[in-house]
Image (cartoon, helix red, strand yellow):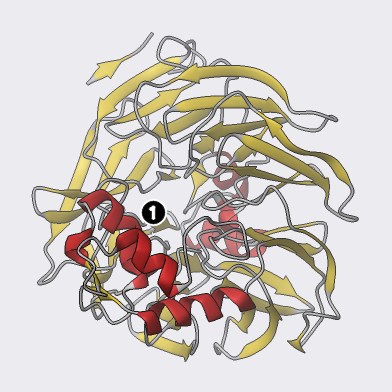
Amino acid sequence: MKVYSYNLRVLFLSALCCGISAAVVAESQWPQFRGPNASGVSETAKPPIKIGLTNNVLWEIEVPWSPSSPSIWGNQIFLTTFHDGQFETRAHDRRDGHLLWSRGIKAEKMEDFHSTDGSPAASTPATDGKNVVSYFGSFGVICHDTNGKELWRHPLPLALSGGSYGSGTSPVIMGDRVILNRDQDANSSLLALSLETGKTLWETPRPGFNGGFGTPILWHNSGVDEVVMPGSIRLKGYELKTGQERWLVDGVSGFVCTTPVIGDNQLFFAAWSPGKGDSSFPTEWSSFLKQFDKNGDGKVLRSDFDPVTWDFVRGLDLNRDGELSENELTAIREHSAKAENVLVAIRPGGSGDISKTHVAWSYNRGLPYVPSPLYYGGRVYMVKDGGLMSSFEAKSGKQFYTQERLGAIGSYYSSPVAADGRIYVASLPGKLTVVKAGGETPEILHQAEMGERIFATPALVEDKIYLRTEKHLYAFGPASRP
């Protein structure tokens, strides 16, 4: 180790339960994936601008590889990993990074996951300062207290999701319950567990939804607390108390990796997936055979692909028999035809199918595949692969700029986060870019090469930023305040 010289009402209730003031909570928590209600925004943090391997490094530690992001409460940083054949929930000291505790668990079977970009521990833990909730698709949900004592576990059937890419969604704490996206290749659902006991409070089936990576958020919509959950082709809102479906927006992306955000009394969702004429991948059977049937026997088998290519195409193997068929390709083509890659702004107050009544505005270019959109300072921002950034007025959809280059090429898995008038964006190859919020073009304030791939989304707390790379966890901040 190297050491260097949910809506606000729900958060307030959590603070009272933990016996600490709301002011302290606002200063020292980043409780889940992308922080408060998955917004990606800290209203109080003032992290440094110049960040890099030699700039404002408070400490650096090695951590086992997993793409999950850090969550923070008080002086503890919580991570999930897959290490030495077991799943782990870890707590690190925020002051110097040292490991406070690690609790492991083994699963009887292992879910499928991408061999180079995936992990069976991809989900970010959630905390309310008293409980630490972790989800592993090969096991289920497990809850510890902040000292590492196991409080309960809720085993679940092996997740078969994400087109065989593994689980990617993260659990969230909403008041007295844990909410989990269980969209899979079959038997999809939205699940609510008791935060106190881990017992099922409700489970709402989601027929027709395939696997996806989005994380649920809380929306206080027309006096009702709702769970908003994206999925294949549709975005839906459910009553938090009962799990009853309240509304849906039809015609969004066919496969969802992103999470919605809230701002200016609207909800924003943006997602892209292959299809709709923007993919060069052949979907007609004759073209598919010509490209992939190596021996001309009229079959396309797993053995026809190298391991890396199979990682990307095995999601087409709907029945998981190791052979890609014409029927499977036809089903995927028909599914894609119903989808639309789009950014939508949704007004509150609707019920039933609100696709034509409550979509305030939409846009269909420059869309992100994995990074979630960001609402900040009255604007919506998106970052897509290739390092292309777009910015819109949240209320009207007015375009300030679209697909402007950040000078950081490559894929993007980490989602943008914001604080103190700045947006922090990390590319998969490992370049961190700091952009000034606002403006008619993205003004780049600083860029740094981290020397390792970055999958995780940074956490912003007080005057610090915490960044997990492929092999390390970093804390950046003013050197005068370690």
Residue at the spot 38% in from the left edge and 58% down from the top edge: 130
Residue at the spot 42% in from the left edge and 54% down from the top edge: 129
Image spot of residue 108 (x, y percent):
9, 72
Quick one: 63 or 128, which is closer to the camera? 63
The residue to which callout 1 is attached is 124
Image spot of residue 181 (x, y percent):
45, 73
- Eyeballing the image, is 275 above or below 481? below
Residue at the spot 36% in from the left edge and 63% down from the top edge: 290
Query: Is residue 415 rendered to the left or right of residue 164?
Result: right
Query: Is residue 117 rendered to the left or right of residue 339?
Result: left
Query: Is residue 86 rendered to the left or right of residue 471?
Result: left
Q: Amino acid at mark 1?
A: Thr
Quick one: 220 or 107, which is closer to the camera? 107
Image spot of residue 119 (x, y percent):
27, 53
Q: Quadrant of residue 338?
A: bottom right
Neighbours of disc 1 within 10 Å: few (<14), some (14-19), many (20+): many
Q: Is residue 166 visible?
A: no
Image spot of residue 300 (x, y percent):
26, 70
Residue at the spot 62% in from the left edge and 84% down from the top edge: 239
Query: Is residue 387 rendered to the left or right of residue 59?
Result: right
Q: Quadrant of residue 140?
A: bottom left
Tell me the quarter of the image containing the N terminus: top left
Quick one: 344 or 284, which is closer to the camera? 284
- Eyeballing the image, is 178 above or below 424? below
- Eyeballing the image, is 402 above or below 163? above
